[in-house]
Each structure stands twice: as C-alpha cells, then as structure tokens.
Image (spheres, rainbow, N blue to C red):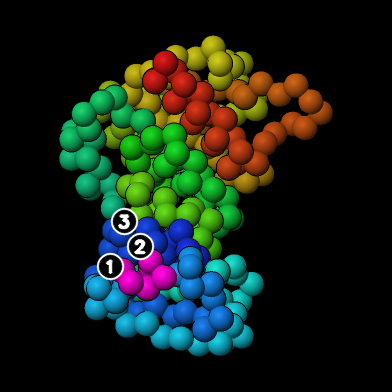
C-alpha cells in the first residue's frame, strides 16, 4: 500500500491525531480558517508537541490541488503501511466473535475506496482486505473521504488475493462474492457466521480467479432499469444487510 504523506480535512486529521499523533510532523493551517472548528485540533497538536504552521488560504489550496482541505493539513512523518497477509492469521485468531471482513478486488477510484472504508467502519467490519497491485492505495483523497476510517478500520494489503482467500477459507470463513449474474439473492442468504464479503472493481467487477475462490455468489436485487450499483453503494447495501442479520 502506498501511504499518504499528507492528510487533510477536519475528520481525517482529527482521527490521525487521536490514533497516531507521533506520526504527524506538523499541521499546516489556513490563517483565515474558522477557529471554532480548528481550535480543539490545534490544542491537541500543541499538547503533543506538534509544530503548527499558518499559511494563507491560497498557499494551502496549492498544497492540496482540487481537495477540500477545510483549512487544515497534516504532514505525516511516518506513513501508515497497514498490515499484510502474514499478520492475518494472528488477527483472525484474536477476534472474539465470528469474522466480518470486506474484501475489495481492485477498486481504482480513491473516492470509492474512501467511501467503502467509511461504510465498513459504520457497519462494524473487523478488517478490510485490499490487493497490493491494480488497485488504489491509501492516498490523501482516501483519507479525506473516509473521514477517519483509515485509522479506525484494520487494513490488510496482500500480494496475492487468491491465496489470501484460500487462507480465509482454511480458517473457516465463508467467502461471499457479489455478482449481478448470481442466482442467489442477498436477502435470502445467511450472513451471520464468519464471512468475508467480496466486491469487485468499478465496471469489471471481480476478477475471474477471485470469483472462483468464492463459496457463494450473491446478487443485490435491482427493481429499476439500472443494471448495477457503484461499488461504494453496493458495499453499503451488502454490509448493512450482514450487519442487520448479525445484530438482529
């Protein structure tokens, strides 16, 4: 996973300061930013000995081209690399309840990945698994859209997704892939046990090898003319159906 050197936006920076303050080299703040929103973060940074640099709004805009920084940016000293497949068995063994995992097979858009992470956090997912290649990494945009979920949800980046799925199956976890062509519907499926829900990339969906490693394929019922949903919307539908079943 390529890690971010900058994290911007109120929620993303707040989550970073709460979880990894030692990784923050400095905060860059627009000198015309709303003090009421920024004051708690600046006080927290000052207490942690983090340098605070004030710049003009224009200068901050130039550092975050096209991004909604909300007047604050954190320069990260040591980027978070998340975890890899070697750490996965120990993580799974430590879970106190049946595993609830989200696997994203090649999501390319950082906005989609950020939205999926945010939804995963809200649904109580234990971890998200991402392939190292042919997928977007944890970029500043992902941090911003995820609103802190990059820091709160364990993220495993794996070099071989098919091998990782076999590893999950060996650990007793059922693999449910999503496919528009699946005969089994989402709402008729039992998602209460140890599960990993797999969603594919934008447009192409799951890769063939990923699909072959799934125990079941599920389809989201579609009543209108649209054939498929955006991956982040689909993630919300399947994760919260699983959440409903598991907490009901």
Query: Which one is nearer the viewer's eye here, 207 or 146?
Result: 146
Give the Cα separation between the discs numbered 3 and 2.
14 Å
Give the Cα separation between the discs numbered 1 and 2.
6 Å
The quadrant where residue 109 appears: bottom right
**Secondary structure of the residue carrying numbered label 3:** loop
Q: Whole-percent x and y of residue 7?
A: 44, 68
Q: Residue at x 46, y 21 (%)?
A: 244
Instruction: Quickly name the residue at label 2.
Output: 16
**Could you tell which of marks 1 and 3 lies nearer the N-terminus?**
1
Crowd band around label 1 with a 10 angstrom C-alpha radius: few (<14), some (14–19), many (20+): many
Query: Which one is nearer the viewer's eye here, 86 or 13?
Result: 13
Question: Cβ–Cβ below 8 Å for labels 1 and 3?
Answer: no
Q: Is residue 40 part of the magenta span, yes or no?
A: yes
Instruction: Quickly name the residue at label 1.
Output: 21
Q: Whole-percent x and y of residue 84?
A: 29, 51
Please say if 154 is above or below 212. below
Q: Is residue 109 visible?
A: yes
Which is closer to the viewer, label 1 or label 3?
A: 1
Q: Residue at x 48, y 34 (%)?
A: 198
Q: Whole-percent x and y of residue 83?
A: 28, 53
Question: Cβ–Cβ below 8 Å for labels 1 and 2?
Answer: yes
**Could you tell which of marks 1 and 2 lies nearer the N-terminus?**
2
Q: Is residue 168 part of the magenta span, yes or no?
A: no
Query: Which one is nearer the viewer's eye here, 237 or 21?
Result: 21
Q: Which residues are magenta?
A: 39-44
Instruction: Quickly name the residue at label 3.
Output: 82
């Amino acid at each position: 996973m390529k890690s971010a050197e900058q994290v911007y936006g109120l929620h993303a920076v707040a989550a970073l300061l709460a979880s990894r303050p030692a990784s923050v080299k400095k905060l860059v703040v627009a000198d015309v930013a709303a003090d009421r929103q920024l004051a708690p973060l600046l006080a927290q940074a000052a207490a942690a000995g983090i340098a605070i640099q004030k710049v003009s709004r224009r200068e901050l805009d130039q550092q975050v081209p096209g991004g909604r920084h909300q007047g604050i940016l954190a320069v990260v000293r040591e980027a978070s690399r998340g975890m890899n497949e070697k750490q996965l068995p120990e993580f799974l063994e430590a879970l106190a309840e049946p595993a609830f995992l989200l696997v994203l097979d090649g999501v390319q858009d950082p906005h989609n990945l950020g939205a999926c992470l945010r939804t995963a956090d809200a649904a109580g997912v234990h971890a998200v698994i991402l392939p190292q290649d042919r997928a977007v990494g944890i970029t500043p945009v992902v941090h911003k859209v995820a609103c802190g979920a990059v820091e709160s949800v364990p993220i495993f980046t794996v070099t071989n997704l098919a091998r990782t799925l076999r590893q999950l199956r060996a650990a007793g976890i059922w693999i449910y892939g999503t496919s528009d062509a699946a005969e089994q519907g989402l709402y008729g499926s039992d998602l209460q046990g140890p599960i990993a829900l797999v969603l594919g990339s934008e447009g192409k969906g799951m890769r063939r090898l990923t699909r072959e490693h799934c125990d079941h394929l599920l389809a989201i019922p579609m009543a209108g003319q649209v054939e498929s949903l955006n991956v982040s919307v689909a993630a919300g539908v399947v994760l919260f159906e699983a959440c409903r079943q598991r907490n009901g």
